[in-house]
C-alpha cells in the first residue's frame, strides 16, 4: 500500500510540474526568464515556510549532509535557471526533450549510489516512460528541421539543465532519508532561493513586479512547484528513486496536452505516441 501511495505522489508531482511549466512559459514570453524565475521561486518559498512550520524540528547536520544539501540545492537551481533561459532563447521542441532526459541521469545514479534492484516489469515500465518522455516532448519534424538548419538555440541550456537536475534529484533521496521530506524541502528551498537571489544580484537582473495577470501566472506556477516538490520528496520514502523519477519526468506530456487544448498548439503523431507510451509505462510501474 505504501508503494502505491508513493506512485500516487509521483503522479501528483508530475501533474503539478506539468501545469507549472505551462504557466511559467506563458510568463517568460511576457517578462523574460530572470524576472520569471526569481518571482517563481520566491513565491514557492512562502508555502514551503508555512507548511514546514507545522512540522519543524531542527535536524542534526553532519558535514557530509551539509555538502549533499549544497550540491543538490545548487545543481537544482542551476537547472531552473538554464531551463527558463532555454525556454526564452530556444525552440521548445529542442529544449524540452533534452531537459526532460534528466531522469535518465537520476536513474543511473540511483542504481550506482543506492544499489536499487528493479524487477523486469519495473524496468520495462521505466523504459517505456523514458521513451514516452522524449517522444511526448518532441515534435520530430521540428527537431529535425532545427538540427538540419543549425537553429538549435537553447540546446546548450537544455543539456546543462538536464545534467544539473539529474544530479540534484538523485541526491535528494539521501537528504530526505536523513532529515525527512519536509525538512529536506525547507532547507533545500532556502538554500536554492538564496543562491538564486545572489545570482540575480551578481548579474544585475532588473526584477520588477509585472502586471497582475502575469504575476498570477508566476504565483500559481510557484505554488505548483512547491506542491510538486513536497509530493516528490514524500514519494521517495516509499519508492525507489529509479521508479519515481521516470513518472515525475513525464511532466512535459502534461504541458503538451495543456498547450493543445488551451493554446490550440498542434500535437504531432510522435507526441501522441509518446503520451500513450508514458501511460503504458505508468501502468507497468504501478503493477510492479
Image (spheres, grey):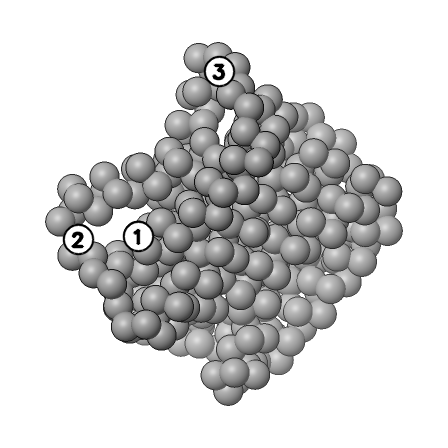
The residue located at (17%, 44%) in the rendering is 201
Q: Secondary structure at mark 2?
A: loop
As displayed, is residue 93 above or below residue 125?
below
Count of marks placed on residues:
3
Q: Mark 3 or 1 closer to N-term?
A: 1
Task: Kindly check if marks 3 and 2 are in contact, taking CB atoms under 8 A apart as contact.
Answer: no
Q: Residue at x 31, y 37 (%)?
A: 194
Residue 43 screen position, x and y as percent: 39, 53
Q: Answer yes or no: do the residues labelled 2 and 1 have beta carbons within 8 Å?
A: yes
Residue assigned mark 2 = 205
Residue shown at 61% from the left, 53% from the top: 13
Disc 1 target residue: 38
Q: Which mark is residue 61?
A: 3
Residue 6 coordinates in the image, percent (x, y) = 74, 44
Which of 178 and 127 lies nearest the eye of the viewer?
A: 178
Report the front residue among 264 and 229: 229
Q: Classify 10 Å Cα crowding around label 3: few (below 14), some (14-19), many (20 and above).
A: few
**Percent position of residue 7, x then y:** 74, 49
Q: Secondary structure at mark 3?
A: loop
Estimate how packed mark 2 is, as few (under 14), some (14 to 19) or many (20 or more) residues with alpha carbons within 10 Å: few
Query: Which quarter of the figure has residue 12?
Result: bottom right
Left or right for 206, reference 64: left
Single out the residue that lies furthest toward the front.
54
Tell me the CA gap for discs 3 and 1: 28 Å
Q: Earlier in the sequence, mark 3 or mark 2?
A: 3
- Which quadrant of the view contains residue 88? bottom left
Residue at the outermost top position: 62
Amino acid at each position: 500500500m505504501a508503494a502505491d501511495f508513493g506512485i500516487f505522489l509521483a503522479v501528483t508531482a508530475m501533474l503539478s510540474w506539468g501545469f507549472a511549466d505551462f504557466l511559467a512559459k506563458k510568463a517568460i514570453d511576457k517578462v523574460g526568464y530572470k524576472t520569471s524565475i526569481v518571482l517563481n521561486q520566491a513565491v514557492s518559498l512562502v508555502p514551503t515556510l508555512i507548511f514546514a512550520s507545522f512540522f519543524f524540528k531542527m535536524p542534526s547536520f553532519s558535514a557530509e549532509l551539509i555538502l549533499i544539501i549544497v550540491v543538490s540545492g545548487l545543481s537544482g537551481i542551476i537547472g531552473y535557471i538554464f531551463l527558463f533561459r532555454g525556454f526564452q532563447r530556444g525552440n521548445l521542441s529542442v529544449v524540452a526533450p533534452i531537459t526532460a532526459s534528466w531522469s535518465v541521469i537520476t536513474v543511473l545514479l540511483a542504481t550506482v549510489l543506492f544499489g536499487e534492484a528493479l524487477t523486469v516489469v519495473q524496468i520495462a515500465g521505466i523504459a517505456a516512460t523514458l521513451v514516452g518522455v522524449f517522444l511526448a516532448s518532441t515534435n520530430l519534424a521540428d527537431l529535425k528541421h532545427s538540427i538540419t538548419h543549425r537553429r538549435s538555440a537553447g540546446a546548450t541550456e537544455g543539456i546543462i539543465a538536464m545534467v544539473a537536475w539529474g544530479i540534484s534529484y538523485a541526491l535528494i533521496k539521501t537528504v530526505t532519508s536523513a532529515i525527512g521530506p519536509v525538512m529536506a524541502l525547507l532547507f533545500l528551498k532556502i538554500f536554492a532561493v538564496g543562491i538564486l537571489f545572489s545570482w540575480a544580484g551578481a548579474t544585475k537582473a532588473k526584477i520588477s513586479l509585472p502586471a497582475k495577470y502575469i504575476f498570477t501566472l508566476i504565483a500559481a506556477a510557484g505554488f505548483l512547484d512547491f506542491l510538486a516538490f513536497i509530493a516528490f520528496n514524500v514519494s521517495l520514502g516509499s519508492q525507489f528513486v529509479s521508479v519515481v523519477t521516470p513518472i515525475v519526468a513525464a511532466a512535459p506530456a502534461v504541458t503538451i496536452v495543456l498547450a493543445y487544448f488551451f493554446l490550440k498548439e498542434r500535437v504531432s503523431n510522435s507526441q501522441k505516441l509518446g503520451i500513450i507510451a508514458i501511460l503504458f509505462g505508468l501502468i507497468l510501474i504501478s503493477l510492479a
